[in-house]
Image: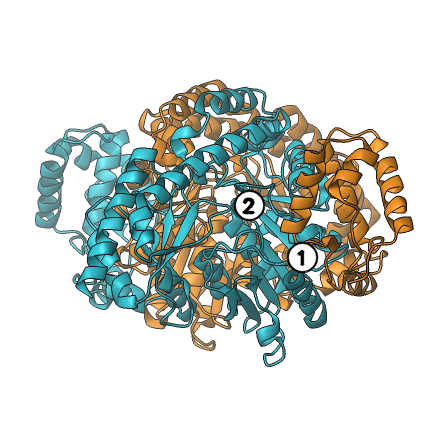
Chain colours: A cyan, B orange
């Protein structure tokens, strides 16, 4: 316990005075606290060094003694200083500099993103491999983006306002009821009527988007190393969830009748989950045939697997009514139905839902409340009214007309290319078309040329797990307005014709 | 291809007529579709059976022919019927009944919740073991619930309305910017000033609650079988996330200086994560000493582990300023700071945040956008203004006074018990006190007696991974009003004295 030398105290006080004289908006006590703390952290005040008395500090710094005491008390509470009875205040004896230099050395300042990826877990790195296409969601042809400009904002905001205002205080708290009851009821009515889903409101679990639904399913129903069968080509968003949950993701081919389980069922070990988009396969657009649906249900039954029915955009069916859901086909089938409001309303809403078999309701509700918590109850209540009052069905009908029109514009713009051999998917439903190409080289060239045109060309081959996949383009036509779609379509037709000539 | 017999067609039409005559609100075509579909599903119409002609059906049922055609077309599209050129419409040849009976047999109608749990994955069952306390969050003494009655609803709703109204259309779409920039900036200012966190806005990632933050951390930084060290006693919400992510959850004892890493570091394999609540340990309430903080940073450095600093309620510090965060102690330390708005504002808001080391920002942002999606942008924007305009700090100050008052009321009510030996934690911070008991039997008796009193007594022993833990009670005093807290405190004092007498 060396006594402080007068020279040290003077040096300290002078430097402190200079630091406090600099302009700053924080209260003086806090600035003094920060200055002293910074000095100890930087080793400018050494362990065991004694601070000048609070009276002297106050006098020399020209601040109130209470200011000094507040700063010093805080530093004592945090352990940077210690008060020794009768002897004064000392810098605590902590090996600060040792730890600090250890951390500095371990992390060179040149640390770039490569260092970040190296720090990740194996599953983290696998997951990031599914993130490649994330930045390409904008511009004409971006898939999965609805017509945000056509959303009934005013009406929706009125409902939101009303329900936010009328919100019971209990809704501010943690909840574990599976979502606002009125929403589960309205949704149930809607699903029974328009999707032939068999359910009662108790089976509905409101989640924060379909992705959260996939996550719950993956973790509650599968362990690490379990298999999930996915469609090939298929939806990488769901695959990312399954992969991050430790599943082995196995591709099952899709043909004109949808996923062909029979082609693999005999030769492969049993899966725990089977992810399908039977109403409107993503991205190929085919509808799963009844025979394939029954074969799928039968295979799930035989393997003890769960079918995850991802019904992401079946509301938009042109021609006849939407194809009924797989979920309602057979009573007691091993199907979990996953729905989302991201396509019908808007992605930023972050609401989706599961329809669960009776026996899974309790576990899923508890796990969801524990892992994700429930929330957004006023938004859920507003949505319940939006559905119950028929606004939802009306919006679906309007968007169906809108998207049918946009698809027609796109087809018209692409007609010259189609006349010269470009093949387009049928487009009986949904928000995108697929254009099949004859070579990966053409795919690559077209995607490259689109950059900088305000056009997002998604290569179909990227939707395949087994590379190289089939070449093609996924053309979203829902999110951009008619003019933009037409312009982009004409551009693509020209570029395609050019690529034909150049071959 | 047998021709339909007239008797069959008559039977079909008569029964259909009866079914359509029943009252119902759906359009006729849809009711006809459903009736026919139901019959095929139930085996009442057999494979290969021919339907009467559409003309005859329309005439006999007394509906328009277009109605019949719409229903039949839908059933053809779904594969239940098939049209054979020149021969008519037939029930498709699908083995419907076989699959249906298989599913029926596999799931007896008596399926209860036990069947549900048996269907879960091993990690799903582990996770549910953390859900036992979920239903006990209400009434006096429920821990972790803020004073929802004191929340400035009117002001908050005004901000929400304004930002919902002014919302750019782009916010309806998928986002991947780590949260609304204005919120990340406002938060950064706040964290630097009041928590001494070292950060710039780019390091902040807005998530849908702290739980989502734990999940991202667990999966991006750890693989299955990796170790996470947690405080003992500790927070089961975080432990549930780590366990569900496949971590081995290992307890490290907490004493009066916080988690004691040195007590285990020499003998145990390296952890990948270390979860701590250094500002105000949950639930014991102790503040981690500076020496322990440095030892923790040093251990993380040595093991290559990441420290997850869970700063759940440090805003509420009575006496001096909140203890500065561990995150800002040393430059380049391996710390991820996790914050939540559930305690300061309200749990139903579902917003929290991570402050990430620079090298992890990119991977976390991409993985979050992929796994969870971002959303609630208008709410984030409203919150940014709430913080930037000082409402947040003001609300924190008001709640600090409110909770200090509620704690004082609780202490006063418990004074007779304390005079007879009940030991209470210091309560320099936070939203709960711990009452230590001398036996698990007393803990059990008190918890049992509280049932039905509108009082939630959380047994301290449940906060321990290694059973039996230390006996005690976790007494939340923030969520119930002064009168309720006082009444509950008096009840507890009486019951405790009774239990002393009975011994």
Indicate the chain on which mark 2 is placed. A
- Residue lying farthest bottom? A267
- Which is nearer the eye, B194 or A140? A140
Name the residue furthest front.
B86
To the question of a shared chain for discs 2 and 1, the answer is yes
| 2 or 1: tag closer to the N-terminus | 2
Q: Position of residue B394 (x, y in %)?
A: 39, 25
Residue at screen point 69% across, 38% down: A193
Judge whether residue B249 can be spotted in this image: no
- The residues tagged by marks 2 and 1 sit, at their Cα atoms, a distance apart of 17 Å
Q: Foreground residue, A230 or B188? A: A230
Q: Secondary structure at mark 2?
A: loop
Q: Which residue is mark 1?
A: A335
Residue B136, x across and y down, in percent: 68, 43
Q: Which residue is tagged 2?
A: A314
Task: Tell me where residue B166 appears, x and y as whole percent.
Answer: 35, 24
| Residue A269 located left or right of residue A253 | right
Q: Between B276 and B6, which is closer to the camera in this rendering?
A: B6
- Residue A64 drawn above or below residue A370: above
> Which circle marks residue A373 in the picture?
none
Which residue is pictured at 55% across the width and 19% down the height? Answer: A162
Q: Secondary structure at mark 1?
A: strand
Q: Chain of mark 1?
A: A
């Amino acid at each position: 316990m060396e006594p402080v030398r007068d020279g040290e105290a003077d040096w300290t006080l002078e430097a402190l005075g200079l630091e406090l004289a600099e302009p700053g908006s924080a209260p003086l006590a806090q600035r003094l606290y920060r200055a002293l703390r910074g000095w100890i952290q930087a080793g400018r005040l050494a362990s065991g060094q004694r601070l000048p008395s609070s009276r002297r500090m106050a006098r020399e710094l020209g601040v109130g003694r209470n200011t000094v005491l507040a700063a010093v008390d805080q530093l004592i509470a945090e352990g940077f200083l210690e008060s020794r009875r009768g002897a004064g205040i000392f810098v605590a004896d902590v090996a600060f500099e040792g730890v600090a230099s250890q951390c500095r050395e371990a992390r060179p300042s040149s640390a770039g993103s490569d260092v970040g990826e190296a720090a990740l877990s194996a599953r983290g790195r696998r997951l990031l491999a599914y993130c490649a296409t994330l930045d390409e969601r904008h511009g004409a042809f971006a898939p999965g983006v609805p017509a945000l400009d056509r959303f009934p904002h005013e009406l929706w905001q009125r409902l939101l306002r009303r329900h936010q205002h009328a919100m019971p205080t209990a809704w501010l708290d943690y909840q574990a009821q599976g979502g606002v009851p009125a929403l589960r009821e309205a949704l149930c009515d809607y699903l029974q009527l328009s999707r032939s889903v068999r359910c009662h409101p108790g089976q509905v679990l409101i989640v924060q988007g379909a992705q959260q639904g996939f996550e719950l399913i993956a973790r509650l129903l599968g362990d690490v190393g379990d298999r999930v069968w996915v469609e090939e080509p298929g939806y990488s968003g769901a695959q990312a969830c399954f992969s991050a949950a430790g599943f082995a993701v196995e591709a099952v081919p899709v043909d004109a009748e949808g996923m062909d389980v029979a082609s693999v069922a005999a030769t492969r070990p049993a899966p725990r989950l089977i992810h399908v988009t039977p109403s409107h396969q993503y991205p190929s657009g085919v509808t799963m045939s009844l025979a394939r649906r029954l074969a799928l249900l039968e295979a799930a039954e035989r393997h003890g697997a769960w079918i995850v029915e991802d019904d992401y955009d079946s509301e938009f069916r042109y021609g006849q009514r939407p194809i009924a859901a797989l979920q309602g086909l057979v009573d007691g089938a091993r199907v979990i139905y996953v729905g989302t409001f991201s396509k019908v309303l808007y992605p930023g809403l972050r609401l989706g839902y599961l329809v669960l078999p009776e026996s899974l309701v309790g576990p899923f509700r508890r796990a969801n409340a524990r892992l994700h918590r429930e929330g957004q109850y006023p938004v859920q209540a507003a949505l319940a009214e939006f559905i119950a009052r028929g606004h939802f069905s009306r919006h679906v009908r309007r968007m169906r007309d809108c998207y049918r029109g946009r698809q027609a514009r796109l087809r018209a713009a692409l007609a010259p290319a189609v006349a010269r051999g470009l093949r387009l998917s049928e487009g009986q439903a949904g928000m995108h078309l697929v254009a099949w190409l004859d070579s990966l080289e053409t795919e690559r060239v077209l995607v490259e040329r689109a950059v900088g045109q305000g056009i997002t060309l998604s290569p179909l081959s990227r939707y395949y797990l087994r590379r190289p996949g089939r070449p093609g383009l996924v053309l979203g036509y829902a999110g951009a307005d008619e003019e933009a779609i037409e312009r982009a379509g004409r551009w693509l037709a020209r570029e395609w014709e050019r690529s034909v000539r150049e071959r």
